[in-house]
Image (cartoon, rainbow, N blue to C red):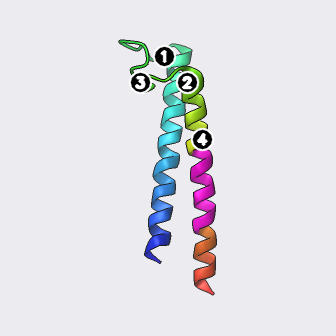
Amino acid sequence: MPFTKLGTLIAGVVFFLGCIQLALLAGVTLGAITEPRPGFFLGNLRREQALDSGLLKIMAAVAFGVITEISRSVERK
């Protein structure tokens, strides 16, 4: 039971961080955010790498969230 709640929290945080990374990437790409030095907001990643990393975080969070929901449904039985 505590691991299910912890897993849900972790999945939510990782999903949030992935969305923030993609939002920063969109801002930098569209020119809404001007970086003081290249790679400052993207963590010294190129734009393609930041996109891949953000999408990977979101997909991993969704998969982890599905696993915790399965754990929760098995726990109720």
Q: How far apart are labels 2 and 3 at the CA level?
A: 11 Å
Badge 3 marks a residue whose secondary structure is loop
Depth check, front residue: 16 or 49: 49
Q: Nearer the viewer, mark 4 or mark 2?
A: 4
Residue 26 is tagged as 2
User: Residue, x 58% and y 58% (percent of image)?
Assistant: 64
What is the magenta range? Answer: 58-68
Q: Nearer the viewer, mark 4 or mark 3?
A: 4
User: Does 28 sit above or below residue 57?
Assistant: above
User: Residue, x 48% and y 36% (percent of image)?
Assistant: 20
Find disc 3 in the rendering and name its residue: 41
Q: How far apart are labels 4 and 3 at the CA level?
A: 18 Å
The reply to whether discs 4 and 3 touch (Cβ–Cβ < 8 Å) is no
Number of other residues with Cα within 10 Å of mark 2, as a class: few under 14, some 14 to 19, many 20 or more: some
Number of other residues with Cα within 10 Å of mark 3, as a class: few under 14, some 14 to 19, many 20 or more: some
Left/right placement of residue 38 relative to residue 58 reads left
Q: Locate residue 18, reporting x and y percent.
A: 52, 40
Q: Amino acid at mark 1?
A: Ala
